[in-house]
């Protein structure tokens, strides 16, 4: 169980919900733009940027589907002030993916890329945290299109906009760079337990200049 799921947190005293959040058991999808069509024969997933061997990596849908599977149950925290408790996800752990495509030693951050050029940045440590998945399933069923099918990133300890839907690539970076919503005024880090919602709240060192 993750600390978001067990209701206690790492120190055993954390409340179930981050501050400013209310429970919503029905997770209604929110997204920018239209839902893309999934064409399995054309779809691929890539890792690019500062890899250890300076190459890029590519998986077709059948190849990605054969990667080692993982499951996790997490609360989902949306910046719009609702949290959906105990969402079960299934997919490929970020750690398993990085084992297949190691980053260079100097990598500090990643950029997750979705369809239509949508992006979200995060620290490499956040991407590799236990429980982070590249999810193909939700509640034991394949992801619905509006929830990111065929693949979405799930980063349960950060606000939901970091959990990029319709995921197509992960870029290894040696310096931080803001993603789509971060360039439009959202907080660079997005920790719900610190209510890091907007860029004006950023402390020195929490985001690139």
Image (tube, grey):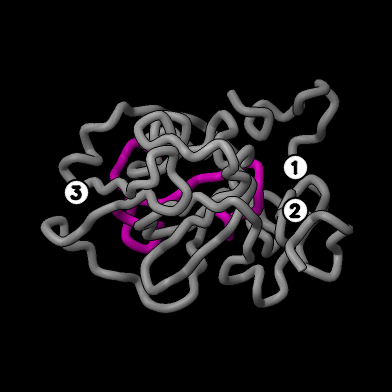
Residue 89 appearing in the image: no
Give residue 118's position: percent from left, percent from top: 47, 69
Is residue 41 left or right of 76 when viewed as pictured?
left
Mark 2 and mark 1 residues within 8 Å of each other at the beta carbon: yes
Q: Is residue 197 above or below residue 135?
A: below
Q: Which residue is mark 3?
A: 60
In the shown orientation, is residue 170 left or right of residue 69?
right
Spot occupied by residue 13 in the image (x, y as percentages of width and height): 85, 26
Q: Residue at x 66, y 34 (%)?
A: 4
The residue at which mark 2 appears reads as 21
Q: CA distance from mark 3 to mark 1?
A: 38 Å
Q: Position of residue 23 (x, y in %)?
A: 67, 49
Alpha-carbon distance for marks 2 and 1?
Answer: 6 Å
**Which portion, as a residue range, is magenta?**
139-162
Q: CA distance from mark 3 to mark 2?
A: 38 Å
* Apparent side of residue 25 relative to residue 195 in the rendered image (left or right): left
Q: Nearer the viewer, residue 163 or 174?
A: 174
Q: Is residue 106 above or below residue 178?
A: above
At 81% from the left and 35% from the top, the residue drawn is 15
Q: Earlier in the sequence, mark 3 or mark 2?
A: 2
Task: Judge whether 96 appears above or below 182 on screen.
Answer: above
Task: Judge left or right: residue 189 versus residue 11.
Answer: left
In the structure shown, which secondary structural element does the residue marked by tag 1 occupy? loop
Q: Which mark is residue 17?
A: 1
């Amino acid at each position: 169980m993750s600390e978001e799921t067990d209701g206690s947190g790492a120190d055993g005293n954390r409340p179930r919900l981050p501050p400013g959040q209310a429970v919503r058991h029905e997770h209604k999808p929110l997204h920018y733009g239209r839902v893309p069509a999934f064409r399995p024969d054309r779809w691929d997933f890539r890792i690019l940027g500062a890899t250890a061997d300076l190459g890029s990596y590519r998986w077709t849908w059948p190849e990605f589907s054969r990667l080692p599977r993982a499951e996790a149950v997490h609360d989902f925290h949306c910046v719009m002030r609702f949290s959906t408790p105990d969402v079960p996800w299934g997919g490929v752990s970020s750690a398993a993916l990085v084992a297949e495509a190691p980053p260079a030693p100097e990598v500090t951050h990643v950029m997750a890329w979705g369809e239509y050029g949508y992006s979200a940045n995060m620290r490499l440590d956040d991407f590799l945290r236990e429980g982070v998945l590249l999810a193909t399933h939700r509640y034991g069923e394949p992801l619905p299109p509006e929830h990111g099918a065929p693949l979405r990133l799930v980063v349960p300890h950060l606000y939901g906009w970091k959990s990029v839907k319709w995921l197509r690539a992960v870029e290894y970076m040696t310096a931080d760079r803001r993603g789509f919503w971060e360039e439009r005024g959202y907080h660079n880090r997005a920790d719900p337990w610190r209510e890091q919602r907007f860029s004006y709240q950023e402390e020195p060192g929490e985001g690139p200049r």
